[in-house]
Amino acid sequence: MEKQLRTLLAIDDEPVILDAIQRVCSAEGWHVDTVTGATEGLELARKKSYDLCLCDIMLPDMDGFQFLEKLHESGIDLAVIMTTGFATIENAVKSLDMGAIDYLPKPFTADEVLSALYRGFRYVDLKRRHEENTAQVDSIIVPCPTQYRHLGYQSWMHLDFDGSVKVGATYLFLAVIGSVKSIKLQPLEAEIIQGFSCAEFEAEDELIHQLMAPISGQIIRINEQLKDEPSILEKDPYFEGWLYVVVPKDLNYELKYVSGCHNIFA
């Protein structure tokens, strides 16, 4: 894995969480500032330039949603990964609508933090390249088709005429995690839940990345070819590289959290 000078702002009111983040970043040679409140974090973000921010949703002085709003109001362009307990995954999904790029469910392991941070830093790199040279990045990262919808930058869904929903990973997610070594899919008839992991990707750098489901439902078809030929996914993620066909569970309610496909970094 590449070793670069990275800067991170970590905000959490649990010292044990901040200590764990500090250890992971130190091992990678990254610089991290840790604070226990969003107000202090916002002040640091105004004074210093960070590549990435890891912020808890539930904080005593200001919640993660307010933090995102304050960043926007202040004109601070800072990529934020939210952290949250499993009981509040719906809030984490909501945070994507408000500008967060990703979220990390608690409790998490050191490896899960590492994978999330690598995704975040690589996302930021691609966004900067996109801003500097749109044509160059757009030539390797294709936005999902206009009739599709996406959850964050990770997963997409497409509603078929028979009411079933096809689910997959976006070009941007695949570009962020790098070349895929193997894919672990859910079994037939399993239930996937919006915002929770629906597939596990092992990248060539040996990092494991979870793909969050864009919609809830029962799996009725699996793209079995991907298990033996993951390259299909990378070549054509929106058509031949789909992951599942599911019968949606609560489509009308969950559609509010998935966005229409447009600018790849919007």
Image (spheres, helix red, strand yellow):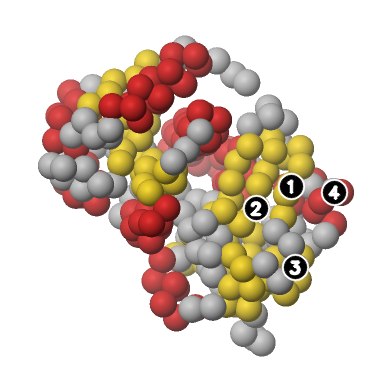
Residue placed under numbered mark 2 in the picture: 199
| Callout 2 amino acid | Ala
Dot in front, 4 or 3:
3
Q: Is residue 105 left or right of residue 228?
A: left
Q: Position of residue 46 (x, y in %)?
A: 18, 29
Circle 4 residue: 229
Disc 4 to disc 1, C-alpha distance: 9 Å
Give, as a three-letter code, the residue at label 3.
Answer: Leu
Q: Are marks 1 and 2 in contact (CB under 8 Å)?
A: yes
Please report whichever mark, 3 or 2, sits nearer to the chain's N-terminal start: 3
Q: Nearer the viewer, residue 62 or 106?
A: 106
Q: Is residue 30 left or right of residue 204?
A: left
Which mark sits nearer the N-terminus, 1 or 2?
1
**Residue 42 x/y as whole percent:** 18, 34
- Name the N-terminal-most of marks 4 and 1: 1
Q: Amino acid at mark 1?
A: Ile
Q: Quadrant of residue 50?
A: top left
Residue located at (49% from left, 78% from top): 251
Mark 3, Cα crowd under 10 Å, few <14 / some 14-19 / many 20+, is some
Inter-mark Cα distance, 4 to 3: 19 Å
Alpha carbon of mark 4 to alpha carbon of mark 2: how far? 15 Å
Quarter where residue 191 is shown: bottom right
The percent position of residue 162, horizontal first and vertical second, equals 66, 87
Q: Name the element at disc 1.
A: strand
Task: Please tell me whether mark 3 sits on a helix, a strand or a loop.
Answer: loop
The CA distance from mark 3 to mark 2 is 13 Å
Answer whether labels 4 and 3 touch (C-beta < 8 Å): no
Relative height, residue 87 to residue 141 (above, below): below
Mark 4 vs 2, N-terminal side = 2
Q: In the rendered image, which residue does mark 3 sit on?
A: 188
Pointers 1 and 3 in contact (C-beta within 8 Å): no
CA neighbours of label 4 inside 10 A, class few (<14), some (14 to 19), many (20+): some
